[in-house]
C-alpha cells in the first residue's frame, strides 16, 4: 500500500468523525470544557481562576477573563526556561511561532493534543476531502504525487524544543515519508540554509520533469502564484536545464547541493521538448493541466483576504481544477475545515477548541453591550470576532479575527474569515478593513488593465488632511499618465469600498490619495530581506498595510515613479 493511500484512509476517517461530531456541537463543547477544567485545575492559571468549580460554559465566561498574548508572555518565558504546570498540565511538545504581530514573534506552546488535531486536519483532512469529491463523481483519485511548495524550517529554543510556524508542523513529523509522495526533494523542503537557495527554481526544476504530478500543494496560495510567476519568466532556462540534466550557473544554490543534484539529474531532451511546445503556445490558457496531464487537484489556504491571489492562480490551473482551501488555522489552533472542495468557508471543529463569538457592528467594532456568544447563538450573515480556548493553555483568547457566518453544516456553523481587526487602516476614523483594501486593488487593476504583482497601503500623516498612499508593483510598464489614472481609480474604488471614506472625502477629513509605482522585484526583495533574517518563507504574508517604520523605509526606497 502506498504512503499516499494511507493518508487517504486517515483522511476518510477524519471526515467520518468530523461529520459525526458536527451533529452535536454544543454537547461536544461542554465535554471539551469539562476535560480542560479537570486537566488544568491544579495549574497556576487554573487555581487563579478556580477551574475546579467551573462546570458550565456560562460559569467559564463569568470567572475567566478574555485574554491576549500579553496575558501569557510571562508564562511562556517561564515555560521555555523550564517551569511546568503554569497554564497547562499537558506536556508541551514544541512551540509555534506566529507572524500575526509586528516585532518580536509570539511563541505559543503546543501540547500533544493540539498537535494531533493539527496533524489530522492539516495533513489528512485535504486527502480525505478530495477522495470524497471524486468518489461522488464516480471517479478514482489515483496515486498522489506532486510538489509541496513550502519550506519547513524552524529553530531550537534555549530549552532545546523546536519552534516552527504552525503551517509547517504537520509535515515536519513525517519528513522521512515525503519522498514517497512529493516531487520536491527533502533537501529543498527541509533546507539547512534556506537563504542560500533559490527555492522556487528548485521546486519547479524537479516538478516539471515529473510527469506523474497529480496535485500541487502549499500552505497558502500565494506561494503557488509566486511559483507560476517565476515559471512564466524563466521557462526557457528551466527547459534548457531539463534537456541537459543541469542546474543553470545563475541559480542560487550551495556548492554541496549543486553537486549532489547534478549527480541525480540526467539529460531529458524528450521531456524538455514536451514542455517547450506547451510553453511556446503561451500562458493564456491554463498551463498546469497542459504540462501535468494527471493533475487532479490543488490545495492551500485561501481566505477572503487572499482572493486576489486565488484569481491569479486560476489563470494557471484553470477554473475547473478542484481546489481544497486547506483550513482556517493559526499558531493558536486549527479552527475550522472545509466540508468540500472549492469552498471559501469552513466548518468549526467542536472537539478541537472552545469557541466564543463577540458580535461586531457594521463598522467592525464591538457594540457597548456586546457579550460573547457560543456557536448555538450565531446568526447566518452576521460578523463576529472569534475568541478561542485551546488544549495548549490559551483561555478565552482574542484572535482579533473577524469571521462571517455563512451557513450550517449538520448542526455546526460555517464561517468565512473576513479580516483582522488590528490590521486595517483608519486615517480619520473611517475604519477601512484589509478586505476593503484588497477589493480596491483588485477593482483598480481590472478597470485600468494593469495587473499588479503586489500592492500595499500607507497612511500619510505628513500632509493635512491625512491621506491614503497606495504602493503598487505593476506587472507591465506604467507611465505618468497611467499613474494618474490609477490615482483617480484609487479614490473612486475607495469610495465604493467604504461609505465612510466617501463621506470623509466630501467633508475634507481625508485628503487626495496618491499612487506610487515600485521597482520591478520590490516584493521579492522584501521577502528575501526577511528570509535573510531567518523568517520562514511560509510565514511571509502579503504586506497589505505598511504599519511599521521598517516597512515604510523599505517600500518607499523602492519607489521609481
Image (tube, helix red, strand yellow):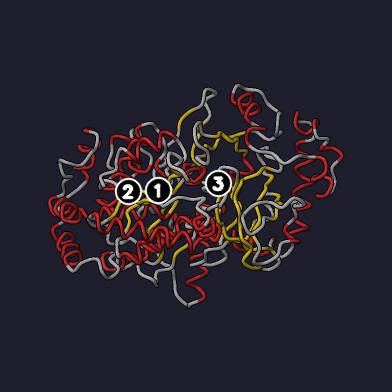
Residue 88 location in percent, x, y? 70, 34
Q: Is residue 72 left or right of residue 273?
A: right
- Residue 7 seen from this side: no
Q: Which of labels 2 and 3 is toward the front?
A: 2
Contact between marks 3 and 1 (CB within 8 A): the answer is no
Earlier in the chain: of badge 2 and badge 1, it is 1
Q: Residues within 10 Å of mark 1 (few under 14, many from 20)?
A: some
Tally the numbered discs: 3
| N-term mark: 3 or 1 | 3
The answer to whether residue 348 is seen in the rendering is yes
Q: Residue at x 33, y 42 (%)?
A: 188
Q: Residue at x 33, y 45 (%)?
A: 523
Per the image, the residue denoted by label 1 is 469
Local crowd at mark 3 within 10 Å, few (<14), some, or many (≥20)? some
Q: Secondary structure at mark 2?
A: strand
Question: On the image, which quarter does residue 309 sit in?
Answer: bottom left
Between marks 3 and 1 in the image, the one whose residue lies nearer the viewer = 1
Q: Which element carries disc 1, helix, strand or loop?
A: strand
Q: Position of residue 322 (x, y in %)?
A: 43, 68
Query: Is residue 496 shown above or below 62?
Result: below
Compare residues 368 and 192 and report the one nearer the observer. Answer: 368
**Could you tell me if the residues under marks 2 and 1 are in contact, i.e. CB atoms within 8 Å?**
yes
Whichever of callouts 2 and 3 sits on the residue coming sooner in the sequence is 3
Q: Residue at x 52, y 63 (%)?
A: 344
Farthest residue, direction right: 53
Q: Are marks 2 and 3 in contact (CB under 8 Å)?
A: no
Residue, disc 2: 516
Residue pointed to by mark 3: 330
Amino acid at each position: 500500500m502506498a504512503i499516499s493511500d494511507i493518508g487517504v484512509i486517515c483522511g476518510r476517517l477524519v471526515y467520518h468523525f468530523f461529520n459525526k461530531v458536527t451533529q452535536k456541537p454544543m454537547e461536544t463543547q461542554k465535554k471539551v470544557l469539562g476535560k480542560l477544567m479537570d486537566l488544568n485545575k491544579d495549574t497556576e492559571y487554573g487555581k487563579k481562576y478556580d477551574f475546579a468549580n467551573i462546570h458550565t460554559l456560562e460559569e467559564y465566561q463569568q470567572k475567566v477573563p478574555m485574554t491576549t498574548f500579553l496575558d501569557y508572555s510571562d508564562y511562556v518565558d517561564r515555560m521555555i526556561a523550564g517551569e511546568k504546570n503554569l497554564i497547562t498540565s499537558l506536556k508541551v511538545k514544541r512551540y509555534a511561532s506566529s507572524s500575526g504581530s509586528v516585532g518580536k514573534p509570539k511563541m505559543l506552546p503546543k501540547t500533544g493534543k493540539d498537535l494531533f488535531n493539527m496533524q489530522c486536519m492539516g495533513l489528512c483532512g485535504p486527502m480525505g476531502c478530495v477522495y470524497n469529491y471524486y468518489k461522488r463523481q464516480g471517479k478514482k483519485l489515483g496515486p498522489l504525487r506532486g510538489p509541496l511548495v513550502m519550506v519547513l524550517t524552524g529553530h531550537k529554543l534555549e530549552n532545546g524544543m523546536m519552534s516552527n510556524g504552525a503551517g509547517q508542523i504537520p509535515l515536519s513529523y513525517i519528513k522521512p515519508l515525503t519522498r514517497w509522495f512529493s516531487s520536491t526533494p527533502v533537501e529543498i523542503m527541509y533546507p539547512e540554509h534556506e537563504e542560500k537557495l533559490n527555492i522556487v527554481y528548485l521546486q519547479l526544476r524537479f516538478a516539471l520533469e515529473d510527469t506523474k504530478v497529480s496535485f500541487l500543494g502549499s500552505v497558502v496560495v500565494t506561494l503557488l502564484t509566486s511559483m507560476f510567476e517565476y515559471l512564466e519568466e524563466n521557462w526557457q532556462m528551466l527547459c534548457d536545464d531539463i534537456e541537459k540534466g543541469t542546474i543553470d550557473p545563475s541559480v542560487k544554490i550551495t556548492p554541496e547541493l549543486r553537486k549532489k543534484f547534478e549527480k541525480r539529474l540526467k539529460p531529458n531532451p524528450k521531456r524538455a521538448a514536451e514542455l517547450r511546445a506547451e510553453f511556446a503556445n503561451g500562458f493564456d490558457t491554463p498551463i498546469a493541466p497542459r504540462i501535468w496531464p494527471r493533475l487532479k487537484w490543488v490545495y492551500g489556504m485561501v481566505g477572503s483576504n487572499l482572493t486576489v491571489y486565488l484569481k491569479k492562480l486560476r489563470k494557471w490551473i484553470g477554473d475547473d481544477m478542484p481546489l481544497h482551501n486547506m483550513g482556517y488555522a493559526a499558531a493558536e489552533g486549527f479552527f475550522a475545515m472545509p466540508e468540500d472542495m472549492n469552498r471559501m468557508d469552513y466548518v468549526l471543529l467542536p472537539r478541537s477548541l472552545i469557541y466564543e463569538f463577540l458580535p461586531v457592528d457594521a463598522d467592525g467594532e464591538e457594540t457597548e453591550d456586546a457579550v460573547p456568544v457560543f456557536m448555538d447563538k450565531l446568526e447566518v450573515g452576521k460578523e463576529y470576532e472569534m475568541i478561542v480556548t485551546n488544549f495548549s493553555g490559551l483561555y478565552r483568547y482574542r484572535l482579533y479575527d473577524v469571521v462571517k457566518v455563512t451557513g450550517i453544516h449538520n448542526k455546526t456553523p460555517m464561517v468565512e474569515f473576513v479580516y483582522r481587526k488590528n490590521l486595517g487602516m483608519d486615517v480619520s476614523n473611517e475604519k477601512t478593513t484589509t478586505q476593503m483594501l484588497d477589493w480596491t486593488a483588485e477593482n483598480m487593476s481590472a478597470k485600468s488593465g494593469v495587473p499588479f504583482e503586489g500592492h500595499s497601503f500607507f497612511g500619510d500623516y505628513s500632509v493635512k488632511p491625512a491621506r491614503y498612499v497606495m504602493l503598487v508593483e505593476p506587472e507591465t510598464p506604467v507611465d505618468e499618465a497611467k499613474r494618474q489614472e490609477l490615482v483617480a481609480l484609487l479614490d473612486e474604488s475607495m469610495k465604493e469600498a467604504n461609505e465612510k471614506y466617501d463621506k470623509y472625502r466630501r467633508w475634507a477629513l481625508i485628503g487626495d490619495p496618491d499612487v506610487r509605482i515600485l521597482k520591478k522585484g520590490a516584493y521579492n526583495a522584501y521577502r528575501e530581506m526577511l528570509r535573510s533574517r531567518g523568517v520562514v518563507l511560509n510565514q511571509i504574508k502579503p504586506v497589505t498595510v505598511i504599519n511599521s517604520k521598517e516597512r515604510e523605509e523599505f517600500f518607499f526606497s523602492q519607489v521609481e515613479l
